[in-house]
């Protein structure tokens, strides 16, 4: 199973305990999953369940114990960090992962479709190792 790690829920999430679903990131995330691992089982988790309004999550708000429980699940075979906050939290835990951009429409990196395609292509290679 592939574990995707995001930062924290937005106020638009249907349930703050379920990452991405209901947020503006959902459409982009779903298209990436279809490209990266169309027939694979996956799960999505946030670094924190805290909703922050227009500010990044602080390190002090990371729920590393909860995150560690997810990444140490024996069913997890690969871990993908979506964005800098997820990457930072996974580095704190000390696990192997691949970093892709966060799928938020506010992420300016997503404006460069060529770069996004290249990152996803490399991630797909990493997943298939």
Image (cartoon, helix red, strand yellow):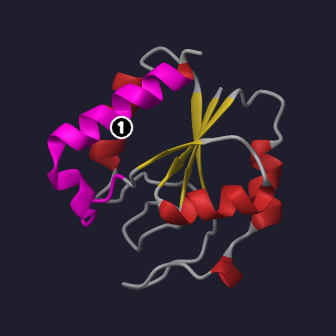
Quadrant where the image shows the C terminus: top right
Q: Secondary structure at mark 1?
A: helix
Q: Is residue 67 left or right of residue 51?
A: right
Q: Quadrant of residue 55?
A: bottom left
- Between residue 94 and residue 5, name the one nearer to us: 94
107 vs 59: above or below: above
Looking at the image, can residue 69 be seen?
yes
Q: Residue at x 59, y 82 (%)?
A: 58
Residues rendered magenta in the picture: 103-126
Determine if the magenta segment contains residue 112. yes
Quadrant where the image shows the N terminus: top right
83 vs 52: above or below: above
Q: Residue at x 77, y 65 (%)?
A: 64
Q: Which residue is mark 1?
A: 119
Magenta segment, prevailing SS (helix, strand or loop): helix
**Residue 44, position in %: x, y?**
56, 45
48 vs 103: above or below: below
């Amino acid at each position: 199973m592939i574990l995707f790690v995001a930062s924290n829920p937005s106020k638009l999430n249907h349930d703050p305990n379920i990452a991405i679903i209901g947020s503006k990131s959902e459409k982009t995330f779903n298209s990436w999953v279809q490209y990266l691992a169309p027939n694979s089982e996956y799960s999505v988790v946030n670094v924190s369940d805290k909703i922050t309004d227009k500010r990044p999550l602080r390190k002090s708000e990371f729920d590393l114990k909860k995150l560690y429980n997810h990444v140490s699940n024996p069913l997890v075979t690969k871990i993908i960090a979506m964005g800098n906050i997820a990457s930072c939290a996974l580095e704190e835990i000390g696990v192997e992962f691949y970093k892709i951009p966060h799928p938020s429409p506010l992420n300016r990196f997503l404006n460069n479709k060529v770069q996004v395609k290249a990152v996803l292509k490399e991630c797909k290679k990493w997943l298939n190792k």
